[in-house]
Amino acid sequence: MSSDDGSSKKVSRKPRYSRFTQQELPACKPILTPALVIGILMCLGIIFIPIGLLALSASENVVEVVDRYDDVCIPSTDQKVGFIKDPATNKTCIRSFTIPKKMRKPVYVYYQLDNFYQNHRRYVKSRSDRQLWNPKAESSTTPCDPEGQTSDGKPIVPCGLIAWSLFNDTYMLSKNDAALQINKKDIAWRSDRTHKFGSNIYPKNFQNGTLIGGAKLDESIPLSQQEDLMVWMRTSALPTFRKLYGKIETDLEANEKITVTIQNNYNTYSFNGRKKLVISTATWIGGKNDFIGKMYMAVGGTSIVLGVIFSLLYVFKPRPLGDPSYLSWNKSPTLD
Amino acid sequence: MKLEDNTTRHDNPRLIHINDPKKTCDNSHFSGNEIRTSKYTLLNFLPKNLFIQFHRVAYLYFLAIAALNQLPPLAVFGRTVSLFPLLFVLTVTAVKDGYEDWRRHRSDRNENNREALVLQSDGFHPKRWKMIQAGEVLKISSDETIPCDMVLLATSDPSGIAYIQTMNLDGESNLKTRYARQETNKLFLEGTMISGIITCEQPNRNIYEFMANMELNGNFLPLSQSNIILRGCQLKNTEWAVGVVVYAGQDTKAMLNSAMSPSKRSRLETYMNRETFWLSVFLLIMCLVVGLGMGLWLNRHKFQLDTLPYYRKVYFQKGKDGKKYKYYGIPMETFFSFLSSIIVFQIMIPISLYITMELVRLGQSYFMIGDQHMYDSLSNSRFQCRSLNINEDLGQIRYILSDKTGTLTENKMEFKKASIWGKSYGDSKAGSREIDATVEECMGSGRKWKLKSEITPDTELIKLLYKDLHGEERIAAYDFFLTLAACNTVIPILTGIPSSISGSLLSDGQTSIDYQGESPDEQALVAAASAYGYTLFERTSGHIVIDANGEKLRLDVLGLHEFDSVRKRMSVVIRFPNGSVKVLVKGADTSMFSILKKDLPCDDRMRHVTQVHLNDYSSEGLRTLVVASRDLSGELLAEWQQMYEDACTSLTDRVVKLRQAAALIECNLTLLGATAIEDRLQEGVPEAIESLRQAGIKVWVLTGDKQETAISIGLSCRLLTADMHQIIINGNSEHECRKLLCDAKAKYHVNYITGEEDRPTFGPLALIIDGNSLVYILEKDLEYELFNLTTLCKVVLCCRVAPLQKAGIVDMIKSRTDDLTLAIGDGANDVSMIQMADVGVGICGQEGRQAVMASDFAMGQFRFLKRLLLVHGHWNYQRLGYLILYNFYRNAVFVLMLFWYILCTAFSTTSALTDWSSVFYSVIYTSVPTVVVGILDKDLSHKTLLKYPKLYAAGHRQESYNMTLFWITMVDTLWQSLVLFYVPLFTYRESTIDIWSMGSLWTIAVVILVNVHLAMDIQRWVFVTHAAIWGSIVVTYGCMVVLDSIPVFPNYGTIYHLVKSPVYWISILLIMVIGLLPRFIFKVCRQIFWPSDIQIAREAEILRKRRPFFGSNADQDSS
């Protein structure tokens, strides 16, 4: 305080002028003129409707076959859980369906689970990513409990409930009695294969307990090649989800009959989960999904309608912009 | 606040042994002179800073959430992540505090290492300031700063005078006199060691009072304010001064006064807290839904829990009594779910908003301070923001309560008229040459004294003064001017001559003389006396010397009763060279007329005539004082002397005792006359008041002046206009006041019950009320009726009000209405009002800095108030109102999005977003644009705002922030959150989408959405705004790329995978458009059908620039 006041006598304290400090910087001040409003709405319509049409047509081009098998691949209605848990029973199940339209390669084979909360917090957190990537961090299994260590204290690799509950139904496809090759290579993300799952990490003590949650892993194959595990470990966002099982590298013609031999191993019966097999082609929009297309059409259409309404409004009930007679004190001068 | 009441009692006085620091400090622990304005040291910085920071509720909330998250069953976020927000704000604040403290340390070090001369065994030696102790004797040279509070012992002046400048203490640049006691001064000059004991008060903050006595060789000498020099002051015009340290370091009055004024909370913030309550209700509902949902879900799956992969309640192999895994039963799980949803939804309560608001206000203050239009070149002062909490209140002010003197007027006094012995002077219209001639003729050619200010003397009065000293009138005139010259505390500063004033001086040519005093009125009076030939040119504590028409008159001052607000007068007792003693009194007319002599009929006549003159003067807007005198002799004099001495040496109740002594002699006075001083209006005041009135602000003037003066000033500053009906309330009793109020109400048909009016037949009303009536009205149950009346009036003028009454009026308005009040003033008498009002504005004026110290904002001129309110107030209010709503929206839309997702995860409080993104959302991804917009956005240019003051009413109508807007925002938020959640949900329904891709999409979608939402509402795009908005989106992408490139995160590689998919991009576009389309349509419809004033003014402003011809008709209509 003292030094400031001392010098103030000689030096003028007048604030220095700059357009910034005086808040006079050149600025763009948009206002919603009628032309701008109508322009924006029309532009939206013009952009959105074509995109919507494109998306719809892309979705139309997708051919998708869905087959629910959990309810039919089980013998009796009472003993579902007992049946599925018993390792001795024969769980082979044969399903068949016809291809409605020509499916161009690659044709993707998915399995779909319903009512399976892969996004449950307890489930999502039950994994150790350090362990999957770094051989030295094998024993960092804290987040994985209760599936972190074997009962004698050895670390499980890969640990956690996610890996433990690995999906273990298998599908064998055949077309007109000839086996269809399902390519299970490159079904996981490249980043997972190359970095996230270590090429020098091998499964250890996996599914060794008495309680088996799902598939077992071949202990001689490094994690970086266990693509089913990688796909499964990318836990789904929603309780109904599909996961890629494999790809068929040949075209499927219309009306061809496909037979699937399913090993119905995976227990979804204890929580009323459904299982489906999905065979589908893909376009730029992904699988079959009309939502995007329809929404784009709807939004585009609404915009154009609104644009027209506003145009009419401006024609029939114009308010001159910046007209002072609309100011509140000019409308009711007695208020003063 | 109330200086006069501060008669502190002293049970344990402080004892200072002169020149014996050991003995002084041994008995009691007086602090040394080392000062520390810094709060921290290196060692205690961390704990102390944390301790202080955690006093804020916001930080406690963060801490509680972070602590909750550390509980194992609740660990929603990772441990480090959950601490991040808390650590972030703590670090930012700590760095800021640390930097400020480092600067304080540096300035402290500089201060402490300065050197001063200290008396040691063999004379004065330099010593560092921090080593100085109480009891030591210091020598200060001219222009040096005083290191601690000292009692003067001696000065280079033989009479013991020292001049100090108290600029650093109270901002007054004029010189003040301080005296060394003659006794010690003499001893010191003789070379004797002074030893004695000073008994003084404990350290206190009052810089205007000091009470002590000094025991010197068995005698008790009284010491007062005029004997002490305070730390921070500078010695001026005095070669050297010697004093003994009484208060050092932290005990000095300067240090004790360096505390800030109490902080206020803005109205908008109060409303905001009300809405925050609603947000807490939403938060609670959401958490309850999650908790209950969890309970119901568990109950439904009760028998499957053991086998569910994500529950694994019991290990199978151990049979029925298997090991439980983190499962505590349905009620506990429900409760934990409730708690963890609080953690996930924590930002629903926008705690960071408080920090954002602080930053925004800081930025706004930067621009207010930097505004060139609020720089006052006369006092070289910028606008000051002393409080950073209430910027936005400036946009909603409904009542302005203004002081008059120094606020509306310049407080530069000019002597205009005088009434002497029943005759008024100063009206003569004679040409200046004639006056000069007369003056020359009377005074002789050589005028010895050259004054800074020129006064044109009245010829007739000059003639009277040059008559021989005969006749009552002539003697009265003589006494009159003697009083003007003697009865004051003004110090004459002679320039161009050595400080020792010799008798030979009078034979010299002209000498320039400058009067320095605390009161501008006194300066004007002394200058006037000099113009009429009575020049005060020397003043010491014991005597004054006056050059009365060439005759050097030395008057001994026996006693001086300073002006106080109770007596409202000042008196001085002087002894003439011939031995006669007189008391000379000047004071306000109300306090003077009651103590005048009433024996003779001619006294009555005189009083009557003077009263008429006084009324004339004050109706011209002049400030008046009444001058009177009385001869003292014999017993009365002796009695008074006895009492006066007693009072002066007394440590307790000195003020009261002095008042009693004064009362003894201030009676039966002979009326000499009255003075009239003009106080000119400040520049631009009428225009400013006119604009403020148009803006719908009620301007009340509270002044200590008389009714007539107040009315005439009111007229000259266009507060009152000729067509106004004036209601005057000036009762002397409760009954009378009640009657006046009732009459006024009856006359103007005020409805008793509602206070509504049904009279458009009358013109605008003005209420003029005086302090006396206010006493009766404010203390009795009449307050309500007064308030009803004031609401009818366009103008309220309160005259003759005491400082506390000013605060009382503010309090009345505050308690009767919800409207915001602003008090503006410049003097110590306005401090209580400034502190009481919602916004206090200080004028850096002539009357010191107390008002400024107590104020929230300070500026150089009244007219800046117009710009401050209409421009900056408007901007600040608009900005902050929007900022709050936007922040509510920004946080709520995010939380609601998380909430919808949690409903799809079996109520397990999973967040699809990565922990880091959840935390960064409000801290990094979206924080900068809100701050930038809060500081830089601007709806209208200052030119428009000043041109149409009525635009200010937007603040009165609470247009930027109100309950309706809040609920509209919340509905919009709900819609946008649903769009945010459901568009991706339907897009990726039955697909292979994984949780991190979905989270990544939601993160970027919500960030883009809230930024585009903000962009839609921005009214002024400058490059900083562009950088902040688009930069935030870029930074978000940057962060996500970084987060997705770390292999130990489960979300590794997500963004690289996503950006290749066209669906990702078109779904973001879809979210934006569907989310914002309703808002856009709403906005357009509002602009078409219900355009706000601001909207229209803005269109006019922008379109006028684009099409210059457009504005012409706009100008005519709305001015």
Image (cartoon, coloured by chain):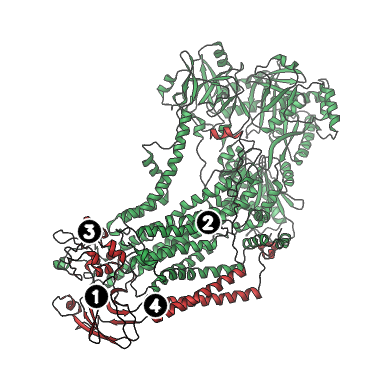
Residue where numbered disc 3 is placed? A141
Looking at the image, residue B104 sits to the left or right of residue B430; the answer is left
Q: Chain of mark 3?
A: A
- In the image, B78 versus B242, the foreground residue is B78
Q: Which mark is residue A268?
A: 1
Q: Secondary structure at mark 4?
A: loop
**Snapshot quadrant of residue B923:** bottom left
**Snapshot quadrant of residue B858:** top right
Distance Cα–Cα, label 4 vs label 3: 40 Å
Determine if marks 1 and 2 fall on one subunit: no
Q: Mark 1 or mark 3, which has the lower sequence index?
A: 3
Estimate the x, y position of residue B1118 in percent, counting from the top left: 71, 60
Q: Which mark is residue A289?
A: 4
Instruction: Kindly report which numbered mark, 4 or 3, lies closer to the viewer in this rendering.
Output: 4
Q: Amino acid at mark 1?
A: Thr
Q: Amino acid at mark 3?
A: Thr
Determine if marks 2 and 4 fall on one subunit: no
Say if A90 sits above or below A28 in the image. below
Chain B rendering hue = green
Q: Secondary structure at mark 3?
A: loop
- Whether residue B669 is visible: no
Estimate the x, y position of residue B262 in percent, counting from the top left: 51, 43
Q: Amino acid at mark 2?
A: Thr
